[in-house]
Amino acid sequence: MWREEMQNRLSSFINDNKGISEEFTSLPALAVVMIGFALFFAMIAGVYYQHNERVKSLDKYEMANFILEKLTSANGLLAEKGIIVGGTIDKKKFEGVGNSQDNIEAIIEESRIVGKEFGFKLVYWEEDGVQTIEWTNIPGDVDKVAASKQVAVRLNDAEIVLGVLTIIVWGAD
Amino acid sequence: MSQIALLIAVGILLASISSLAFYSDWRKKAEIDVIAMQIAKIIDAAEVKDYPGRIKYMLPDKNYDYEVFLSTDYIVVKRYDGRMNKEIVATKELHTRPWINPPMSGGKGADGIYNYFGSIYGIHHNGANPDSKLPAGVLEGEMEIMANELAKNPFKIDCEKPLYVEKIFIYVEGGNAKSLVLIYQ
């Protein structure tokens, strides 16, 4: 008897379609907060990734700058080869070396730079306009990094002009 | 039920994000990355010197233990207090090949090297000046021995002692003076 009564009560409770609904539920609010959190952390991850990429780029540039400074120092390899004479770049010598693959390879080997290859590009200003000399070993389709410095370029015994020497570095195979 | 499920999902999401942000080892790796970078910069600074000179560098004193290894191409800094992985490693590539822990006798640095070569090839072939040039091929041979040795057993730096990075010039037959960077303790 008592059991039947309980079952009837339970059944009527479950099947009753009337009910009181609260006007405001926490579900949408919680969903909005969680979406906000997720977006915030995605943004933090993006910023961290960009920071890392920036550090890597800076590292590559510093490496290129280091190689440039090492090779163009007063006792550096370019001075040994006669490309830099008295602090100025000899245009004829620079052009001569840059057109010869053997000379370029010899310089890269003697530089003792590990794991990298490099080429030079010289831009200088003449009366006719801007002239550019680029070494022939610079590839077009690899990831490269460059660093530049201002130099004096000796065109001949009577003429020295301003120029920019750029080193372009890429990974060796 | 859906509220409980959402609360559980929120809890899991917050726990995973906070573990990534606060308990991962990226900060510890960044700390030893800085140490590796500092050592690399010292070596680069010695490399671009135009004249002989020595730099004395003390490794930074930290509130954690770390080890520094040098091989021919890399600086490796390790610490062993990671949460995810016990060992955290930072490596920095070297762009030139210094002479690490070279054989020296009767002194350290340039004098030690000249004495070492002098003891083998005679005082008139120790490479110290243009009148006493080292025989050709000797330097390359020594560097190759160093490279092979370091490949098997990287040089472990004693973090309590100063590290010396010295730029020297060695005169070799058949060529001009060769510049080298020595690293020793």
Image: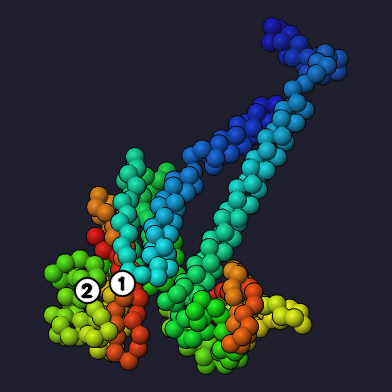
- Of all chains, the one bearing label 1 is B
Contact between labelled residues 1 and 2, with CB atoms less than 8 Å apart: yes
The secondary structure type at the circle numbered 1 is: strand
- Of all chains, the one bearing label 2 is B
Q: In which quarter of the image is the C terminus of chain B?
A: bottom left
- Could you say which quadrant of the image residue B164 lies in? bottom left
Q: In this view, does A76 lie to the left or right of B114?
A: right
Of badges 2 and 1, the one in the foreground is 1
**Residue that label 1 marks:** B168
Q: Return the disc, 2 or 1, that comes first in the chain's sequence.
A: 2
Residue A20 in view here: yes
For the point 59% across and 73% down, which residue is it? A151
Q: Mark 2 and mark 1: span between their CA atoms?
A: 9 Å
x and y percent of residue A66 in the render?
Answer: 49, 67
User: Could you tell me the amino acid type at mark 2?
Assistant: Ile
For the point 64% across and 32% down, which residue is it? B10
Taking depth in this image into account, of A128 and B40 the one nearest to the observer is A128
Above or below for A25 versus B150? above
**Residue that label 2 marks:** B113
Q: Furthest residue to the top?
A: A2
